[in-house]
């Protein structure tokens, strides 16, 4: 109980630091458009149900051509941080999981994000396009596995043995790095937790808490480099927070099967256009 309470306090404290840094980095009044706020609402609503927000947000930005490709990662990290922090609060309270496992996995993911953000926030556009295009195809692959019922079913454990914990720590460290390249971590985390024999529901506080804290920590480098769209990031936050509250506290379940197929098609299209842009840059 003490570790869980400490974790909630840590997320809240980090969120306050994050807001102060964001306000300083923005340097003025941002006015997100209704479309930018709507993207935040929709992506975070379904993110709370485990679909993930990075692939869907990237697809929306790419399809609608709302910003340069090199700004997408920073915009998502900054804009989704606070909505995911709200998710973390909801699932830490609602879902039981070994607090030692939870805190350990969060700690290594934060370390990975901190190391990865220093490099990712300064990458040229073409490598970013390649990483994000590849990541979108990976997300589409995981979505397809889920739709076909090929995800591991998982077990009933709420903790991990020492050997399994070491494996999970290594993978979470890598996921912290790849998140800084715009590659979402929810699907790999869910597969990992299930393969290790844990109850898949235990993945949610792990995913949300890790996602929130590593996104906030990783965002600082993108703020410093100015690699984000100020209006769009605020739109994600303003639209996303109420969406999370509605999805997490009011709408407990949805018929998501058809929606997931639609998202899969859009993500594949966005991945294709992202990689096509990277190849076009190479020719130029």
Image: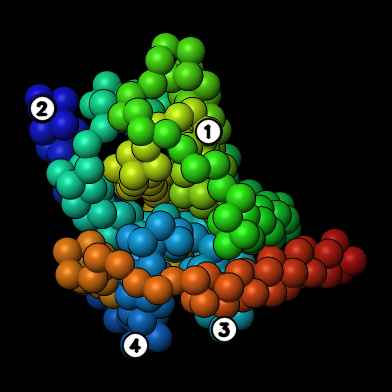
Q: Which residue is mark 2?
A: 1
Identify the disc placed on residue 64: 3
Q: Mark 4 or 1, which is nearer the eye?
A: 1
Provide the residue designation for mark 4. 34
Q: Residues within 10 Å of mark 3 (few under 14, many from 20)?
A: few
Cα gap from disc 4 to disc 1, whole angstroms = 41 Å
Query: Vertical placement of 145 versus 2: above or below?
Result: below
Residue found 15% across the figure and 44% down from its top: 93
16 is higher (above) or lower (below) than 165: below
Crowd tier of the residue under label 1, counting other residues whose Cα lies within 10 Å: few below 14, some 14–19, many 20 or above: some
Answer with left or right where residue 115 lies relative to residue 41.
right
Q: Is residue 243 left or right of residue 35?
A: left
Looking at the image, tell me whether mark 3 or mark 2 is earlier in sequence order: 2
Q: Residue 269, relative to residue 115: is it above or below?
A: below
- Dots 4 and 1: beta carbons under 8 Å? no
Q: Which mark is residue 195?
A: 1
- The residue lying toward the viewer, choosing from 226 and 261, is 261
């Amino acid at each position: 109980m003490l570790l869980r309470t400490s974790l909630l306090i840590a997320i809240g404290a980090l969120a306050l630091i994050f807001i102060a840094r964001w306000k300083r980095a923005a340097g003025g009044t941002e006015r997100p458009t209704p479309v930018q706020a709507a993207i935040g609402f929709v992506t975070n609503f379904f993110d709370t149900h485990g679909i993930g927000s990075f692939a869907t947000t990237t697809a929306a930005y790419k399809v609608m051509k709302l910003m340069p490709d090199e700004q997408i990662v920073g915009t998502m990290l900054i804009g989704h941080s606070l909505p995911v922090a709200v998710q973390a609060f909801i699932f830490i309270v609602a879902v039981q999981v070994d607090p030692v496992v939870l805190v350990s996995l969060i700690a290594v993911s934060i370390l990975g994000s901190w190391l990865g953000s220093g490099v990712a926030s300064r990458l040229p556009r073409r490598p970013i396009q390649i990483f994000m295009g590849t990541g979108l195809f990976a997300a589409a692959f995981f979505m397809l596995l889920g739709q076909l019922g090929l995800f591991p079913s998982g077990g009933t454990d709420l903790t991990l043995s020492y050997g399994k914990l070491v494996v999970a720590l290594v993978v979470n460290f890598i996921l912290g790095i790849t998140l800084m390249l715009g590659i979402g971590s929810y699907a790999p985390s869910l597969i990992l937790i299930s393969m290790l024999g844990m109850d898949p529901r235990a993945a949610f506080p792990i995913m949300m808490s890790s996602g929130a804290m590593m996104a906030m920590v990783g965002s600082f480098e993108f703020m410093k480099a100015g690699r984000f769209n100020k209006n769009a990031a605020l739109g994600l936050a303003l639209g996303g927070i109420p969406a999370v509250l509605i999805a997490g506290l009011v709408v407990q379940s949805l018929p998501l099967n058809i929606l997931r197929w639609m998202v899969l098609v859009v993500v594949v299209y966005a991945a294709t256009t992202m990689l096509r842009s990277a190849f076009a840059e190479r020719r130029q």
